[in-house]
Image (cartoon, grey):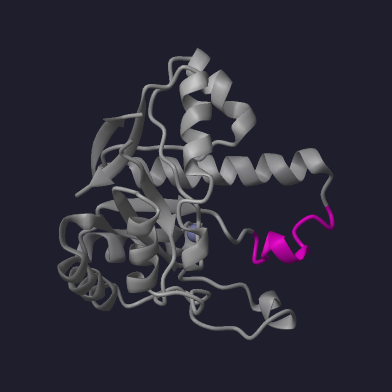
Amino acid sequence: MHLFDNHNHSQFSFDGGRTSVEASARAAAAAGLKGICFSDHCDHYVPPMKASFEDLKPEHFDVPQQQAEIDRVQGLLGDNIKILKGIEIGMYEECREDIRKVLSENSFDQVLASVHYIQQTDPYYGGYYDDKDWKQAYGTYLETIYREMTWLAEGHRGRIVELDRDALLRYREMGGEIISLGSDSHEPSRVGTGFPHFAGLLKSLGFRWTAHYESRKLIQLPL
Ligand SMILES: [Zn+2]
């Protein structure tokens, strides 16, 4: 199998203190993966309400530093594993200029777009749900994802939407073929967790390939 873990965090993420590029890349090689992509957090806006729950820190990282470290570790590990340069960009409408800037000034293998914050809140800690029923809350969230993804995709190649397990079969039935695996690991022991199981599940649902990006180009490898 040619499995890549396309969603991992390192010491360059504000919450990545439990691992490093080197530790997680070594863990990926030890797990038999062919590649790992570091998609460190880059949120330009952090809602002030988060300060009631944890110490606020900037949530964006120094891209050239992260990429230099990836080059260094790639040199150490050689052909054992391919280490890809990614970013998990926090989509927030008021931050579009910052987002455009970081994406145009750097080159990435993969850009992962996430909506972590919405309407000046962090839904993880509540607040967002207080004055909404579930339909309004999830409807607004999904519409925000769709709007920001559509904006981001203008002028860029390739788009993969993160799907949960229940949506996979429907996606396949509708002709969907592009599947990317990512653990969202924040520590080495989580890299590639359950990937042989998920590869088997995908095969059983009729998928033939897994996908990853190199220099923003889609690559599909047989499952
Ligand atoms: Zn993540």
Q: Residue at left 59%, top 40%?
A: 143
Q: Which residues are magenta?
A: 119-131
Instruction: Report the quarter where the C terminus lies.
Output: top left
Q: Give the total number of marks visible in the rendering.
A: 0
Q: Residue at left 74%, top 46%?
A: 137
In magenta stretch: residue 16: no
Q: Is residue 46 left or right of residue 61?
A: right
Q: Position of residue 72 (x, y in %)?
A: 19, 74
Q: Position of residue 75 (x, y in %)?
A: 15, 69
Q: Is residue 198 left or right of residue 78?
A: right
Camera-side residue of 84 and 57: 84
Residue 153 makes an appearance in the image? yes
Q: Is residue 140 above or below residue 170?
A: below
Q: Position of residue 34 (x, y in %)?
A: 29, 48
Camera-side residue of 102 and 94: 102
Camera-side residue of 15 and 144: 15
Instruction: Report the quarter where the N terminus lies.
Output: top left
